Image (cartoon, rainbow, N blue to C red):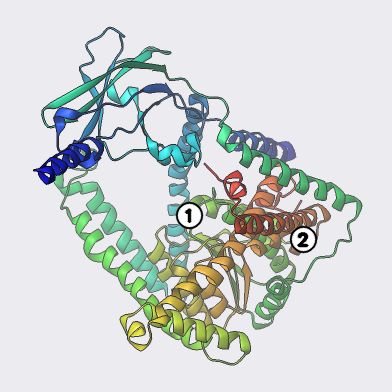
């Protein structure tokens, strides 16, 4: 059992890790074909995993409804939304699901007039959250937050026409802040991230990091 | 009379030496002096490269047309590419020609024979022949030269050798420190506030009897940040099992969910509390970005977790999730390598693992010597990069830019 649960996954991780790392340096057709095959496997596995995800979702909400836990009404709505969408998806505008997908059906209507606006509504909340987060951050309580406040005000003014009306130097200062200190910090983070990603990859390829298999050893 | 004569002489001279005037006079098209075809290096064997020097006639009104044939003595009727004569230079292919100044004196195009002979089967190692013509209005001038090449795949991408060498060096350093760490397990690690606060957050959740919410980012299992997040989840789940607290893990990818379930289950098993594991606590909430945000936000406001962990790669949802969590009064620990979202997490969370700290977390929490060795290797790698950056800056300040191209990725 340990062989199947530990050794086999570790061998697969090592072989595929080394193979795919080397694949990056080999431009030959065979190498490209290997990448295509592996990517196709990934898509197939992801396709099957959707069923596991759907089971998890429906099982969780069914349990919530059955036990009448707080907010179980939302779980009813999950079933309602899923069933309505499935019905119209299967109907496919009267052509049924075994034919090509039809345009302008109720399924499309649900997507364009329910899901998309609902998503846009959630996204629009971001503007208010940015304002509240900015208010909290820009309170000049420490030296660092004072520097942040000044830099943020200069960048914000430099990005709108009024900044240029106040002083022609403000847009130039804003550009300098973005192109020099901001970019330097960003690159510093990216270099650290890249080294971390390489180290993590090596730990997984050589079986040193095994926690993704479950357990710590 | 002398003035008229002088004006005429100047006009004639200008007519011969001004490229723009040539372009307006198609009768005087001067084709390039040479025309070469070659197999494009470092590819899968699908393209052939063509190059020729610029002509004094080059202008937007003059075109270069390349014809292809499988036979050297063929009719060359198939037009393969048509470009304006003031476009497509070798400067667009630094991976082949580097950054020489004279690159702008040569045109360069790539031909995809399979696309040209779409639907026809080309035998392997088929030599193809090309003819170049200059076209302006009704005038067409062919070069006498017929160029030929055979496309074949390459086994090594020579322009990626720099990347390969760096990978070998960095890998060697990491492996050295892993082996070194086994012999010297008491390695010094700088404190990472966000990870030291994990115990505090879990303790608070245990005391309050409220759940701990672990929020995955939006990337799939193929992303290295998701793998790092899974590793951290395993460590946190182990501690939660020890503390007998309640862990909830929300996912937006079914594969990540399956792996998370397995990792949490194993952690509970390892802690000797397999009975405490409930697979319904590691669940899929939604597979799309904003439905995911709405669902997780709902969980936060209804269940009011004592601690929120945002670990992985996040996009626009980062601030909405973290700000919602902040309003519920939870201790919040975020860890991401998405530098665009870091300011939002730093603003709204109590502790944030910045970039590389996300990858260091697993080693830091487990304190396993071999894992900690990689952290030392990362620091040595950073030291090397700093040396290279300083050296590059000094050299570039003196006009020596070769080091820039030495580390260029193609």
Asked if labels 2 and 1 share a chain, the reply is yes
Q: Residue at x 25, y 50 (%)?
A: A89
On the rendered structure, is B248 left or right of B199? Answer: left
Q: Is residue A78 left or right of residue B236?
A: left
Location of residue B18 in the rendering, given as x and y in whole percent from the top left corner: 24, 40
Where residue B84 sits, quadrant-wise, is top left
**Residue that lies at the very extreme toward the top in this rendered image:** B73
Q: Secondary structure at mark 1?
A: loop
Is residue B274 something that shows in the picture?
Answer: no
Res. A71 image quadrant: bottom left
Against B410, residue B356 (above or below) is below
* 2 and 1 marks in contact (CB < 8 Å): no
Q: Chain of mark 2?
A: B
Viewer-side residue, B110 vs A18: B110
Chain of the residue that carries numbered disc 1 in the rendered image: B
Near mark 2 (Cα within 10 A), the count class, few <14, some 14-19 or many ≥20, is some
Across and down, in percent, residue A211 comes to: 69, 52
Q: Secondary structure at mark 2?
A: helix
Report x, y in % for residue A25.
Answer: 58, 34
Q: B210 or B30, which lies in front? A: B30
Q: Earlier in the sequence, mark 2 or mark 1?
A: 1
Dot 1 surroundings within 10 Å: few (below 14), some, or many (20 or more)?
Answer: many
Residue of label 2: B366
| Residue that extends furthest to the front in the rendered view of this protein | B2
Is B236 on the left or on the right of B341, as rendered? right
Give the residue at the far right of this rendering. B183
Q: Disc 1 marks which residue? A: B253
């Amino acid at each position: 059992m340990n062989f199947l649960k530990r050794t086999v996954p570790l061998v697969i991780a090592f072989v595929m890790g080394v193979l795919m790392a080397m694949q990056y340096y080999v431009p030959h057709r065979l190498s490209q074909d290997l990448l295509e095959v592996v990517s196709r496997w990934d898509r197939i596995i992801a396709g099957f995993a959707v069923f596991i995800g759907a089971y998890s979702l429906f099982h969780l909400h069914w349990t919530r409804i059955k036990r009448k836990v707080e907010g179980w009404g939302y779980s009813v709505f999950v079933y309602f939304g899923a069933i309505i969408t499935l019905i119209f998806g299967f109907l496919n505008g009267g052509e049924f699901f075994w034919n090509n997908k039809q345009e302008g059906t109720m399924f499309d209507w649900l997507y364009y007039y329910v899901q998309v606006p609902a998503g846009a509504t959630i996204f629009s909340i971001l503007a208010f959250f940015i304002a509240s987060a900015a208010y909290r951050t820009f309170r000049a309580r420490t030296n660092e937050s004072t520097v942040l406040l000044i830099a943020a005000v200069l960048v914000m003014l430099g990005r709108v026409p009024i900044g240029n009306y106040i002083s022609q130097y403000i847009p130039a200062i804003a550009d300098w802040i973005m192109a020099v200190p901001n970019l330097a910090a960003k690159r510093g983070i990216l270099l650290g991230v890249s080294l971390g990603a390489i180290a993590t990859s090596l730990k997984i390829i050589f079986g040193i990091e095994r926690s993704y298999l479950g357990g710590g050893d | 009379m002398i003035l008229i004569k002088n004006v005429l002489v100047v006009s004639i001279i200008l007519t011969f030496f001004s490229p723009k005037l040539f372009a307006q006079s198609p009768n005087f098209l001067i084709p390039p002096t040479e025309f070469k075809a070659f197999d494009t290096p470092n590819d899968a064997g699908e393209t052939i490269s063509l190059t020729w020097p610029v002509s004094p006639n080059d202008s937007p009104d003059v075109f270069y047309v390349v014809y292809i044939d499988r036979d050297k003595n063929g009719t060359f009727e198939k037009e393969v590419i048509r470009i304006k004569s003031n476009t497509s230079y070798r400067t667009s292919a630094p991976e082949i020609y580097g950054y020489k100044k004279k690159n702008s004196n040569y045109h360069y195009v790539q031909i995809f024979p399979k696309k040209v002979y779409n639907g026809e089967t080309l035998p392997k190692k088929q030599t193809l022949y090309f003819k170049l013509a200059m076209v302006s209005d009704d005038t067409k001038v062919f070069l006498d030269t017929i160029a030929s090449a055979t496309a074949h795949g390459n086994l090594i991408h020579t322009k990626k050798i720099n990347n390969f060498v760096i990978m070998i060096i960095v890998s060697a350093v990491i492996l050295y420190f892993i082996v070194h760490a086994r012999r010297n397990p008491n390695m010094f690690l700088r404190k990472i506030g966000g990870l030291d606060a994990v115990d505090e957050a879990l303790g608070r959740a245990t005391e309050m009897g409220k759940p701990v919410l672990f929020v995955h980012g939006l990337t799939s299992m193929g992303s290295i940040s998701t793998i790092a997040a899974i590793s951290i989840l395993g460590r946190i789940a182990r501690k939660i099992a020890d503390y007998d607290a309640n862990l909830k893990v929300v996912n937006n990818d079914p594969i990540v969910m399956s792996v998370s379930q397995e990792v949490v289950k194993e952690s509970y098993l390892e802690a000797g509390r397999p009975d405490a594991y409930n697979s319904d606590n590691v669940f899929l909430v939604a597979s799309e970005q904003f439905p995911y945000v709405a669902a997780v936000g709902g969980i936060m406001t209804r269940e009011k977790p004592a601690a929120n962990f945002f670990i992985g790669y996040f996009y626009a949802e980062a601030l909405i999730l973290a700000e919602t969590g902040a309003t519920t009064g939870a201790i919040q620990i975020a860890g991401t390598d998405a530098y665009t979202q870091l300011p939002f997490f730093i603003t709204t969370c109590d502790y944030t693992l910045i970039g590389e700290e996300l990858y260091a977390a697993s080693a830091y929490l487990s304190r396993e010597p071999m894992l900690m060795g990689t952290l030392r290797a990362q620091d040595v790698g950073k030291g090397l990069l700093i040396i290279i950056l300083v050296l590059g800056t000094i050299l570039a300040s003196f006009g020596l830019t070769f080091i820039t191209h030495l580390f260029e990725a193609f």
